[in-house]
Amino acid sequence: MHSRQNIRDPQQVTTDPATTALVAMAFLRSGTTLQQGAYRPTLANATEYLISATEAADHQAFNITERTGTQPQIKLGANVDVALAAQFFARLTPYLNHDPMTYQRVTAALDRCIAMLEASQETDGSWNNRGWATVLNSAMGNNALELAERVGRPVNRDAMQRSQQYQRSNVFADGSVSTESSAGIPLYALCSTQRATASSANTTRQALSEMNQTTDTLSTQLAVEALRQQGIDEEEAVTMAADYVANVQAARQVLRDDVQRGFGNNGGEEFLSHMLTSESLAAMGGAEWEAWYSRMNELYSNIQNGNASWSGHHCITSPVFCTAAVVMAMTADREPRALMALGS
């Protein structure tokens, strides 16, 4: 619970879907599946817990649990459980070709979570549901829609476009950052925008490269022209170019030491932000990802607990949540290519 931030023993708190989903994703990305891996039984238990919670949820509800006041809910958003569960279901789906029954249950649960997200989305494209740094909740929602679409599930295109527009709008073309929904912390908004715009940005970089233009230019005009030369229509090219410019601005600022300090010390929100940047850079690969990985490896080595876990020092302090987020940040390059934030 949020009121028990000082508790470091995971056995002393009741589990919640958001934390369980993040841990399950960390197991999955680290090589454990429902068929193999050292933690296969644990992943199977987590999967059953999340599926059952989703199946039992009220069809009219906006969450898959009746638990309230958890650290992820208070700090990110009251229905963050849905977004993280959806991400896990989407990431699990490619591993279920051998098991039609589990595939059916997982995809049905994923579809229900997506329906909840679409129904609870704000008109501006966000998921600002009573949290401290709700931009991160909105980032989790955006990721859920994107991942669901990538594994072939039906996603409302208007909901996706409004979500992407919201994320893009937090970083302006001149580099300024809106921190209204990020508790005044630029890191959270920048990482959220960076991840949400990664796919369009990578497609634009490829197009610019084929025009022999620098792939980190801030020229919207050049970006639009490069995309048009790839056969993309004018309206979509303009939107993708705006995503690209926001992504470049976010990526540049995320690397600054003052931005990386976040709240001033590391909490679950910082680790989750790192995960978002890792997913964006790992999709692109190359020197940028390698430099980021080295930087995070040094940071995490210096702040790791004696029992090999990581804990937050503010807000989301849960060592279970924080350790899972760190694992996700450090293994982003292991995501199956079909799920990476790459342009089509």
Image (cartoon, rainbow, N blue to C red):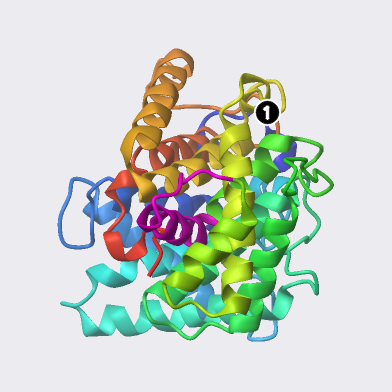
Work out which quarter of the rendered image holds the N terminus and state it: top right
Res. 225 visible in picture: yes
Point out residue 63 in the picture as x, y percentages from the top left corner: 65, 70
Mark 1 lies on residue: 262
Query: The C terminus appears in which quarter of the rendering?
Result: bottom left
Is 61 above or below relative to 193? below
Q: Tell me the amino acid under the disc marked 1.
A: Gly
Q: Which segment did they paint magenta?
A: 197-217
Q: Is residue 306 left or right of residue 40?
A: right
Q: Position of residue 175 (x, y in %)?
A: 72, 40
**Residue 160 found in image quarter:** bottom right
State the residue at coordinates (51%, 32%): 319
Q: Is residue 337 magenta?
A: no
Q: What residue occupies the far right of the structure in this picture? A: 180
The image quarter in which residue 288 lies: top left
191 lies above or below 28: above
Which one is in front, 167 or 97?
A: 167
Asked if residue 338 lies left or right of residue 65, the reply is left
Q: Main secondary structure of the magenta part?
A: helix
Name the secondary structure under disc 1. loop
To which quarter of the image does residue 187 belong?
A: top right
Answer whether residue 215 is magenta in the image: yes
Image x and y of residue 210, in percent: 36, 57
Q: Nearer the viewer, residue 252 or 292?
A: 252
Q: Is residue 13 visible?
A: no
Instruction: State the residue in front, 229 or 69.
Output: 229
Residue drawn where x is 77% and y is 42% of the image: 177
- The correct choice, above or below, for 127 with respect to 297 in the image is below
- Residue 240 image position (x, y, % from top left): 57, 65
Tally of numbered tags: 1
